[in-house]
Image (spheres, rainbow, N blue to C red):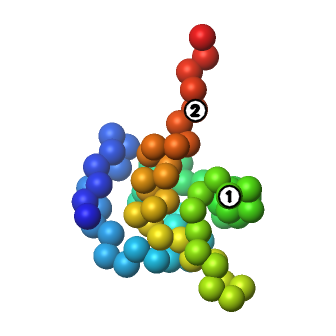
Amino acid sequence: MQTTTPHTTPRTITSPMTDITGLRLSGIFPAGREPSIRTLREWTKRRRIPYHKVGHFVYYDLNEVMMHIRTRLKVPARA
């Protein structure tokens, strides 16, 4: 699957499941504006991004996170 955003170059996601470091560096966030690991852990704790838990390990499906961010995490404009 190729993705194109105005802030990043097209990338091909080959392994959709990754850990938190891989999520941060996966290229689904704008270059130079990647959220910190602390922010990603906070989003996971508050269930703002989808994740999968296997035992005590937490994995993220890059396709699910990308679609969730693009469709549900929009900040409404001020009136």
Amino acid carrying mark 2 in the image:
Val
Q: Residues within 10 Å of mark 2 (few under 14, many from 20)?
A: few
Label 1: which secondary element: loop
Looking at the image, which is closer to me, 77 or 72?
72
Label 2: which secondary element: loop
Amino acid carrying mark 1 in the image:
Arg
Q: Residues within 10 Å of mark 1 (few under 14, many from 20)?
A: few
Instruction: Estimate the spatial distance between the alpha carbons at disc 2 and disc 1, rounded to whole Å.
Output: 17 Å
Q: Is residue 40 visible?
A: yes
Q: Is residue 34 above or below residue 12?
A: above
Tell whether 29 sits left or right of 36: left
Tell whether 79 sits left or right of 45: left
Image location of residue 30, percent across then percent down: 45, 48
Q: Is residue 32 visible?
A: no
| Pair 2/1: label in front | 1
* Quadrant where the image shows the N terminus: bottom left
Q: Who comes first in sequence, dot 2 or dot 1?
A: 1
Q: Is residue 27 above or below residue 4?
A: below
- x 68%, y 88%: residue: 55
* Quadrant where the image shows the C terminus: top right
Q: Can you name the residue that lies furthest to the bottom here?
A: 55
- x 49%, y 52%: residue: 68
- x 59%, y 57%: residue: 49
Cβ atoms under marks 2 and 1 closer than 8 Å: no
| Residue 16 sits in quarter | bottom left
Q: Which mark is residue 75?
A: 2
Image location of residue 53, percent across then percent down: 64, 79
Q: Which mark is residue 47?
A: 1
